[in-house]
Image (cartoon, rainbow, N blue to C red):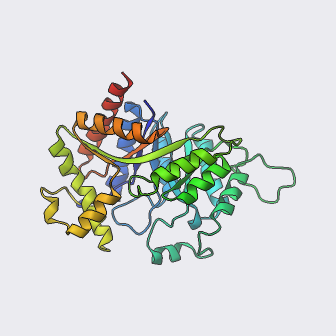
């Protein structure tokens, strides 16, 4: 069975705060490490009260420092918000502190609303230069030359695996052209998944960083003791998506008994479409769902996210998924 990994948004739940969110993140990372998950990624979002991972590199250091073997990284850093040199320095620092354990995933979206994007991009107001910025960033990780005017210190000559993230054909095409691993955001934007995977695998050009295509797919998996319990837990994620689409992002809400009373038919259609890559249920239901998803799409790795309100229930979900993976290994 392919590797399973964790995507954590450091959720801030109703009745809690960011301090507790960070404590929960580290606790979940430690449990994920003990359960055999391959990587633990955190994502850059801004101006979202329910997501505490805005300072992504700082939080990666917190998690890496509190674990010992699991890979820790960004899924991802939204590169248009940053100077490539600064990102190289940050991740060069992390990779120096935690050798062989740091990943850098790059996205070209702002990870926020338009007003916040403008506030972030004081000297850069467009993602059009994303390919050039990726190339510049990769160059900073190469060994410095004697007459090189600008170098990343630390960063130059340090091995930091770089991924491209995306939900469209753009990043699939760029990943293939640059010979980089590719992570598709199918957990919230599945429309172009099959086409993007096919394009990436067909057009991949081997590079010094990667000899063959390597694709990771995001999937929502919420597991519990019964299908009914898991479906109830999943209403937290469904509510969060509706709130975001209503223009009212807030703290992560508790689950509810009847989601049909919460959303309109139009909202239901939109959210179920966005969250189509989801496996929700008991261990047996999750096993069947994972088998079907992997057989159909043939990813090289699964990045699993579970936006569950109760921390212990969230940890239990990941534990059930790890048990399912052991069963699939035979």
The residue shown at (35%, 56%) is: 19
Query: Which of 198/265 is in front?
Result: 198
- Is 91 placed above or below 84 here? above
Q: From the image, which quarter does the N terminus lie in?
A: top left
Percent coordinates x, y for residue 167 in the rendering? 48, 58
- Position of 234 with respect to 105 (left or right) is left
Looking at the image, how many numbered discs can be counted on the residues? 0
Query: For residue 36, which quarter of the picture?
Result: top left
Picture quarter with the C terminus: top left
Position of 316 with respect to 132 (left or right) is left
Viewer-proximal residue among 19 and 202 = 202
Most distant residue in the right direction: 147
**How far across and down, in percent of the image, does residue 41 sit?**
46, 47
Residue 327 appears left or right of 195: left
Q: Residue 56 at x, y = what percent? A: 49, 56
In this rendered view, identify the residue nearer to me: 67 or 109: 109
* Observer-nearest of 115 and 34: 115
Is residue 52 placed above or below 202 in the rendered structure?
Answer: below
Vertically, is 82 above or below 65? below
Residue ID at (24%, 33%): 284
Q: Is the residue 141 above or below the residue 119 in the image? A: above
Query: Measured from the top left, where is residue 133 in percent x and y?
Result: 66, 62
Q: Is residue 181 visible?
A: no
Q: With 22 as the anchor, is 156 left or right in this view?
A: right
Give the quarter of the image for residue 46. Answer: bottom left
Does the image show residue 116? yes
């Amino acid at each position: 069975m392919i590797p399973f990994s964790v995507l954590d948004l450091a959720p801030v739940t109703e009745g809690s705060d960011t301090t507790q969110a960070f404590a929960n993140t580290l606790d979940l990372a430690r449990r994920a490490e003990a359960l055999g998950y391959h990587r633990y990624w955190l994502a850059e979002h801004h101006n979202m009260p329910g997501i505490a991972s805005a300072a992504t590199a700082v939080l990666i250091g917190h998690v890496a420092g509190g674990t010992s073997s699991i890979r820790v990284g960004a899924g991802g850093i939204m590169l248009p918000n940053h100077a490539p040199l600064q990102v190289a320095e940050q991740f060069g620092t992390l990779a120096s502190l935690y050798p062989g354990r740091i990943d850098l995933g790059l996205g070209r979206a702002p990870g926020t609303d338009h007003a916040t994007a403008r506030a972030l991009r004081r000297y850069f107001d467009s993602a059009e230069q994303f390919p050039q910025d990726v190339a510049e960033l990769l160059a900073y990780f190469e060994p410095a030359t004697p007459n090189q005017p600008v170098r990343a210190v630390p960063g130059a000559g340090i091995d930091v695996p770089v991924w491209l993230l995306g939900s469209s054909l753009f990043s699939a095409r760029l990943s293939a052209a640059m010979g980089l691993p590719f992570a598709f955001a199918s957990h919230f934007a599945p429309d172009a998944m099959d086409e993007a995977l096919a394009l990436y695998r067909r057009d991949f050009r081997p590079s010094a960083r990667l000899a063959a295509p390597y694709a990771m797919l995001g999937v929502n998996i919420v597991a519990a003791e019964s299908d009914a319990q898991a479906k109830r837990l999943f209403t937290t994620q469904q509510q969060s998506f509706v709130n975001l689409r209503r223009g009212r992002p807030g703290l992560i809400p508790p689950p509810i008994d009847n989601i049909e009373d919460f959303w309109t038919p139009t909202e239901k259609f939109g959210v179920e479409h966005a969250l189509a890559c989801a496996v929700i249920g008991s261990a047996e239901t999750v096993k069947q769902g994972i088998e079907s998803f992997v057989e159909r799409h043939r990813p090289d790795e699964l990045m699993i996210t579970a936006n569950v309100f109760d921390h212990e229930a969230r940890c239990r979900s990941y534990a059930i998924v790890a048990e399912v993976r052991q069963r699939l290994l035979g």
